[in-house]
Image: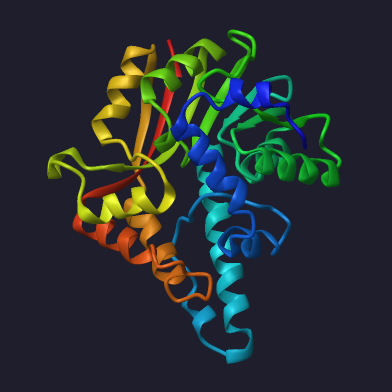
Amino acid sequence: MTTTPSATAAVLRTEFQKAVAAYWNTNQQDPVNLRLGEVDDLYHHHYGLGDYNPSVLEGPAATREQRIIEEMHRLETAQADVLLDHLGAITPQDRLLDGGSGRGGTSVMAHQRLGCAVDGVSISEYQVGFANEQARKRGIDESVKFHFRNMLDTGFETASRRAIWTNETTMYVDLFELFGEFSRLLEFGGRYVCITGCSNDVKGLRSKAVSRIDEHYTCNIHPRSAYFKALAANNLTPISVVDLTPATIPYWELRAKSEVATGIEEAFLTAYKEGSFHYLLIAADRV
């Protein structure tokens, strides 16, 4: 995928956005994402939910790592299923948007489950190219398309989307700008679903563990309260809020035992267990 300098400048408007894009464009061979996706050719860019099967840690040592990889992938696919469960009533005629679509796994799952058209947007040209190739290989590229665009200013038509989701991408943007754009894109009664990590306001300023996560991923984790303030300011009314923190801890415990561990696992586990970091699902309707 080639993009002119002027087109790139139109998408990447700040030094922070350029740094984030550079991180994902150069972090192409990250085994955490690639090895898990190779299990069934469904590539995600998020974490997992649910208890892992302890039997994957038993049995022949020669196949132990592959068992762990397959189980981690099962958990991350389960996470995407939970998100899709909250989209509400969707028909094949509806159009959906995946904000910060990564390598495209959740968009593919949405189309497979719901039969509707999905557009994904990412500021990583590499991710966009990878995801479009996945859609082409699956023969769904007429319905599932990925675009090198900024989710703060997508260029799509007003009220053109029945549902929008972000899956661990809101920590890279200003929430008021983001939800303003999503409010514009959603039809009346449309649904926005977010899964995200957020700092716990009750604990005060972000903890050392949360700050370490920020630094590792070149992101800016928002406090929990910021989500609800930004939603309210943009005519998005929460209908469901689910604390997924207990359900995501097993994923991190299993990942810490794997060969694809990056060293950030300790920070996530510390932050979750000390209560300074929450893993939330928020579903909100456009009113």
Taking the image as drawn, is residue 87 in sight? no
The residue depicted at 76 percent of the width and 39 percent of the height is 132
Residue 162: horizontal and vertical position, in percent? 59, 19
Quadrant including the C terminus: top left
Q: Residue 2, located in which quarter of the rendered image?
A: top right
The residue depicted at 60 percent of the width and 51 percent of the height is 26
Who is closer to the viewer here, 118 or 27?
27
Residue 77: horizontal and vertical position, in percent? 58, 53
Q: Residue 199, located in which quarter of the rendered image?
A: top left
- Relative vertical location of residue 196 with respect to residue 13 in this rendering, above or below: below
Who is closer to the viewer here, 233 or 131?
131
Residue 144: horizontal and vertical position, in percent? 75, 33
- Relative vertical location of residue 282 with respect to residue 236 in this rendering, above or below: below
* Left or right of residue 223, residue 194 in this image: right
Taking the image as drawn, is residue 79 in sight? yes
Who is closer to the viewer here, 240 or 281?
281
Number of numbered discs visible in the structure rendering:
0
- Relative vertical location of residue 82 with respect to residue 226 in this rendering, above or below: below
Q: Residue 128, located in which quarter of the rendered image?
A: top right
What sort of colour scheme is used for the picture?
A: rainbow
The residue depicted at 51 percent of the width and 23 percent of the height is 13
Residue farthest along the front direction in this orientation: 5
The residue depicted at 59 percent of the width and 60 percent of the height is 30
